[in-house]
Image (cartoon, rainbow, N blue to C red):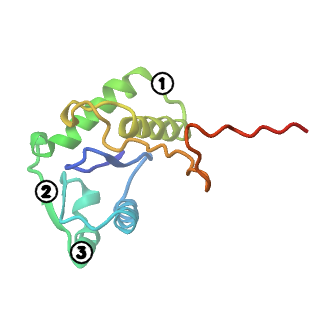
Amino acid sequence: MLAIVDEYTRECLALDVDRQLKSDDVLERLAWLMATRSVPEYIRSDNGPEFTAKVVRGWLKRVGVKTLFIEPGSPWENGYVESFNGKLRDELLNGELLYTLKEAKVLIERWRRHYNTIRPHSSLDNRPPAPETITAEPPSATLRTALEPLEISQW
């Protein structure tokens, strides 16, 4: 599983699930995020082979992103992702039996959306990091005052 969390907003930007994730998968997700969001100043990650691969480090350097690798065996250096992983485990994975990869992908993505848009976060004053916005219909072109009667016609 590849979890990408914005340290500032606490939003889970991606949560990719597969039987095995390689450096190409990481590059594809990072490229998509940078194209749709923006290029971050740095990326903090563990020392997994998918992040330490020469191709990933070279690509990040070319796009101007600094890398911050946590020390092996020091999960507290990546506290936001570790906290996120704990919540994912407690709130979803410990209570589900996932029989297929497709089922896992669907349920985990559903949980990620709930986490970002509905679930309150204590570090954000009990608000979600990326609440859904509901917009009202734009007002009609003609406005009435409260004293004007409505015109009703019958067919």
Image location of residue 132, percent across then percent down: 43, 42
Residue with the mark numbered 3: 58
Q: Please state if 125 lies on the left or on the right of 131 as rendered.
A: left
Q: Earlier in the sequence, mark 3 or mark 1?
A: 3
Indicate whether 28 appears above or below 141: below
- Identify the disc placed on residue 69: 2
Q: Please state if 72 lies on the left or on the right of 48 as rendered.
A: left
For the point 13% across and 59% down, the residue is: 68
Q: Earlier in the sequence, mark 2 or mark 3?
A: 3
Q: Nearer the viewer, residue 149 or 114?
A: 149
Secondary structure beneath dot 3 equals helix
Amino acid at pointer 3: Gly
Indicate whether 62 appears above or below 96: below
For the point 44% across and 47% down, the residue is: 18
Amino acid at pointer 1: Leu
Position of the N terminus by quadrant: top left
Q: What's the distance in space between the residues labelled 2 and 1, CA to CA?
A: 33 Å
Q: Residues within 10 Å of mark 2 (few under 14, many from 20)?
A: some
Q: Earlier in the sequence, mark 2 or mark 1?
A: 2
Q: Nearer the viewer, residue 13 or 21?
A: 13
For the point 32% across and 37% down, the residue is: 128
Amino acid at pointer 2: Phe
For this orientation, the residue located farthest to the front is 147
Secondary structure beneath dot 2 equals strand
Q: Residues within 10 Å of mark 1 (few under 14, many from 20)?
A: few
- Identify the disc placed on residue 85: none
Image location of residue 100, percent across then percent down: 54, 35
Q: What's the distance in space between the residues labelled 3 and 1, CA to CA?
A: 39 Å
- Identify the disc placed on residue 97: 1
